[in-house]
Image (cartoon, rainbow, N blue to C red):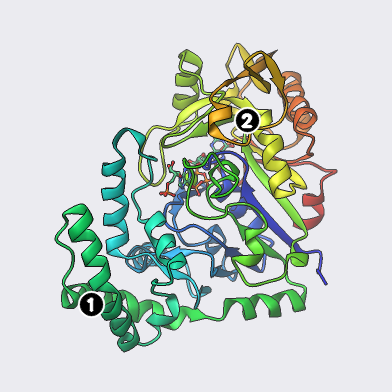
Amino acid sequence: MSNGNSLVVVGAQWGDEGKGKVIDYLADKADLVARFQGGNNAGHTVVYGANIFKLHHVPSGILNEGTLCLLGNGMVVDPLVLVDELSELEKRGINTKGLRISSKAHLNMFYHRDLDEENEKLLGERKIGTTGRGIGPAYADKVMRRGIRAVDMVEFRTFRQRLEEILPLQNLILNKIYDHKGYDLEQLLDIYRPAVERLGPLVSDTSLILAESLQNGDKILFEGAQGALLDLDHGTYPYVTSSSTTAAAAASGNGIGPQHIDQVLGVIKAYTTRVGEGPFPTEDHSEAGAQLRERGNEFGTTTGRPRRCGWFDAVIARYAARINGLTGLAVTKLDVLSGMDTVKIGVSYDCEGSRAEIFPTSIEKLSKCSPVFETFPGWDEDISRARTIEDLPAAARHFLEVIEDRVGVRIELVSVGPDRSQTIIKDSSNLKRWHF
Ligand code: GDP
Ligand code: IMO
Ligand code: MG
């Protein structure tokens, strides 16, 4: 049975909602933090004082000394990037000894990155706008049953053997389809050897580690990457990522039963952003969108691309609540709205003259919809020092109440700045019980 102590944190929009900040804040009280999907397409920023950390594979819990951090079987791991990430953390005095990699996680290799880039080139105008990190091709190889797994790094000769088996086909695909010269086995082995030797000892049966942790009654956090609308099944397909980003994947992506998931916290910005291509109903191409980008510093953590910006969309939030079973919301970047004359919330869509409350099932249907907004007075106060809901101006409190009402999920946490300390936990929330 569940021990009542596990919490999944997922993005409830198109990624970059501030999951890293929320996880880091909550991890202070966690014994274990586990990622369950995605790879280094993720960019999670954590800020405390003058320290800024940008994490790609490693769970944001690593910054809390003593927290065990797992990379689950549902992830694709780039060994070269992970080694750099660990070295950088260690250089900055962070203890990374608590990191373990699931033996069943798949490896995201050099040729996956090439395939990702070449595929995007081939798509031309129809490109997805991927992060170029090889994510889609790495998951495709997993599904095609020709991937290299983390367990293959335990002994270098196994890694060599797997690469020897797999490289000819990868080279054939690169040569014949993409006119790319491909890779020499020995050269690749030389490049990978230090990473494989460094990571091999970290490879573990992470499902077993979790089972023991659940048994002990430990506090466990699952860290989602990307967001609900980028989910491979439920997102704005094909403009999605290649993994299941929703809460249920925390179980399958870590090898535990779904009954061990107690709460699901959806992280959502007080407005909306998206990087890459694909539909975005509340996108604002006017001055307001530009203001959100500038004030919210909306440039990608992973690729530096400017993020597309627009107003809060309650239709996608309700959808994210349904497909994740959200038990609470964490609303981030409320401070970014300070100084706007008016603030808007998309509450439904107008789809060819009829009102839709429910998110359409395909992007073709979605393309015929435009948002219906409710507009509210803004507030001028700097709210970055607010530490309780009562510290917020009435207009900001009202904005949050409207979000709660239109989404139908309780707000449990409000973030008013990037720093760990700039966080409000509602007194009445489940999170308060979890966290203290
Ligand atoms: P993630 O991918 O969901 O972890 O989000 P990112 O880290 O990619 O993007 C969120 C950005 O907003 C980061 O630069 C955070 O430091 C920053 N951030 C998070 N919460 C807040 C907040 O409440 N206010 C402001 N101004 N910035 C925030
Ligand atoms: P975090 O965890 C925002 C987007 C890409 C592209 C699509 C597919 O930081 O929230 P991929 O490289 O995954 O094949 O790209 O998904 N994307 C993200 N957008 N935040 C992310 O991660 C993202 N990871 C992927 O921009 O549109
Ligand atoms: Mg991000």
Mark 2 Cα shell of 10 Å, populated few (<14), some (14-19), many (≥20): many
- The reply to whether residue 310 is visible in this rendering is yes
Q: Quadrant of residue 152?
A: bottom left
Q: Quadrant of residue 35?
A: bottom right
Rendered location of residue 250, percent (x, y): 64, 61
Q: Residue at x 43, y 75 (%)?
A: 149
Q: Residue at x 76, y 55 (%)?
A: 263
Rendered location of residue 52, percent (x, y): 45, 49
Residue underneath mark 1: 189
Q: Residue at x 31, y 40 (%)?
A: 123
Residue underneath mark 2: 270
Rendered location of residue 116, percent (x, y): 32, 52
Q: Is residue 351 above or below residue 250?
A: above
Towards the viewer: 116 or 218 = 116
Instruction: Locate the N terminus and report the quarter of the image it occupies.
Output: bottom right
Query: Which amino acid type corresponds to the residue marked 2 in the rendered image?
Result: Ala
On screen, residue 161 versus residue 350, left or right, reads left
On screen, residue 136 versus residue 407, left or right, reads left
Separation (CA) of disc 2 from disc 1? 47 Å
Mark 1 Cα shell of 10 Å, populated few (<14), some (14-19), many (≥20): some
Q: Quadrant of residue 208?
A: bottom right
Query: Callout 1: helix, strand or loop?
Result: helix
